[in-house]
Image (cartoon, rainbow, N blue to C red):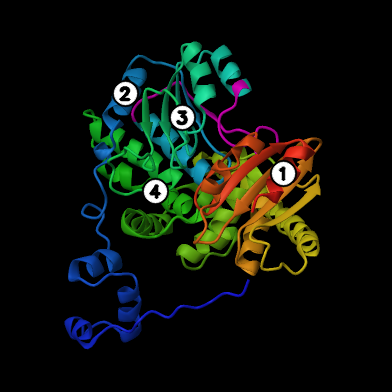
Amino acid sequence: MVKKWSIKDKYGAEFAEQFPEINPLILQLLFNRGLTTQDAIDRFLGPDYLRDQNDPFLFNEMKSAVEKILLAIQQGENIVIYGDYDADGVTATAVMQIALKRLGAERIKVYIPSRLTEGYGMNMEAVEELSKNGTNLIITVDCGISNKAEIALAKSKGIEVVITDHHLEPAERPEAVAIICPTLEKEKYPFKRLAGVGVAFKLAQALLRSDKKQNNDAFEKWLLDLVAIGTIADSMPLLEENRTLVKWGLIVLDKTQRLGLREIMNLAQVNEVDVHSVGFQIAPRLNAAGRMDHANTAYELLVTEDEAEALAITNDLNQKNQARQKTTEEMLKISLEQIGEPTAGDKILFSAYDGWSPGLVGLVAGKLSDKFNRPVIVFGKSGEEYVASGRSVPEFDITGALNDCREYLAEFGGHEQACGLTVVGEENYEKFKKIQ
């Protein structure tokens, strides 16, 4: 499908007269984005940390979440942060762990599932294991909204759950102590496009601002390097609150005190800390851990306070990233051979291969979607199970479309432009592919 460029109308003379100091090219770009007032332009070009982000307590259930977590800390409960294996999930996990430690929590553990053996989100086996280990409270980051059954199991075991997530709302919401998720239909929080780390940060922000024992203003801002990395890595739009968090996060990242991040930037020869260096040099190395092995490595890199460990983990992640690049190129070559020359009737493109890693199919799907300008789903087959990731174009909500054919899916979830899914059985797989 050939890309069609649609050129926006040029701004009028009156608009130009309002902002004579702005370069005409920049002015056209601002006009194209609907930024036509002094206030809107100022907020876009120079986001202010206090003015241009929202009060975390605007979330419907933030107060309940904060009260529960502070009580758990006070009572010395066993708290588990249940994260995700990509850069967004790993940075969200680190943000929450660092904030809880600041608040005096002593019994904190982190659980990040294996992308290769457990898949995305919570699972029953993990909940059972956490129950056996005496867990009292689970705080999810970048996951949980689709885990109704798993959270019900946790509740039956006496474990309370606070959810922070940013994925699309499922048909049935889980029953948790509190759900902090901007995408919920009835959620009043004004900005809907926070990354998983952005939602985790808003909870951390609310907790830190509720702490009466110490001043956490500066501490809060030092978390922003992690927020910037996760937001950029998850391809969230750099608009409104995200723009504020990323702008100030990049400033913090340039001065970061995290040994692991400093080692990564040194190894990757990051000369200028900006969106490009985060997206193409830092984030891929963090993501390589979960794609090729286990994301615990990336998490440890973010929280380590040992220089030797930081250096060793950085070298390990760099090697994994190089292996990831090589394998991805091999998978892309096979996918291109399978797809061939798509016809106009091929509205969604599919590729599949026995043994392909669930950690890499999303990367291949993204490259194919960019090349062919249409939705792509790439499967890795293992026995009777087909695990896939999909990437889409702006005009097509791929996760919404999956909801319409969920009868063939064992599980699925995601955003408008990216999804993950599992199909069990060749019959379901073939029927699923025929729905266009």
Q: Is residue 119 magenta?
A: yes
Residue type of the residue flagged with mark 1: Lys
**Dot in front, 2 or 4:** 4
**Residue 264 falls in image quadrant:** bottom right
Specify the principal SS of the magenta part.
loop
Disc 3 + disc 4, Cβ < 8 Å: no
Task: Give the mark nearest the N terminus, 1 or 4.
Answer: 4
Residue situated in front as seen by the camera: 320 or 267: 320
**Part of the protein shown in magenta:** 103-124
* Residue at 73%, 42% in the rendered image: 429
- The CA distance from mark 3 to mark 2 is 28 Å
Task: Give the mark nearest the N terminus, 3 or 2.
Answer: 2
- The CA distance from mark 1 to mark 4 is 35 Å
Q: Is residue 59 left or right of residue 136?
A: left
Residue situated in front as seen by the camera: 86 or 348: 348
Disc 1 + disc 4, Cβ < 8 Å: no
- SS of the residue under disc 4: loop
Instruction: Please give the residue where the numbered disc 4 appears in the rendered image.
Output: 194
**Dot in front, 1 or 2:** 1
**Residue 329 falls in image quadrant:** bottom right
* Residue at 65%, 68% in the rendered image: 371
Q: Is residue 147 visible?
A: yes
Instruction: Please give the residue where the numbered disc 1 appears in the rendered image.
Output: 431
- SS of the residue under disc 3: loop
- The CA distance from mark 3 to mark 4 is 22 Å
Q: Residues within 10 Å of mark 4 (few under 14, many from 20)?
A: many
Residue type of the residue flagged with mark 4: Leu
- The CA distance from mark 1 to mark 3 is 25 Å
Residue 373 x %, y %: 60, 67
- The CA distance from mark 2 to mark 4 is 24 Å
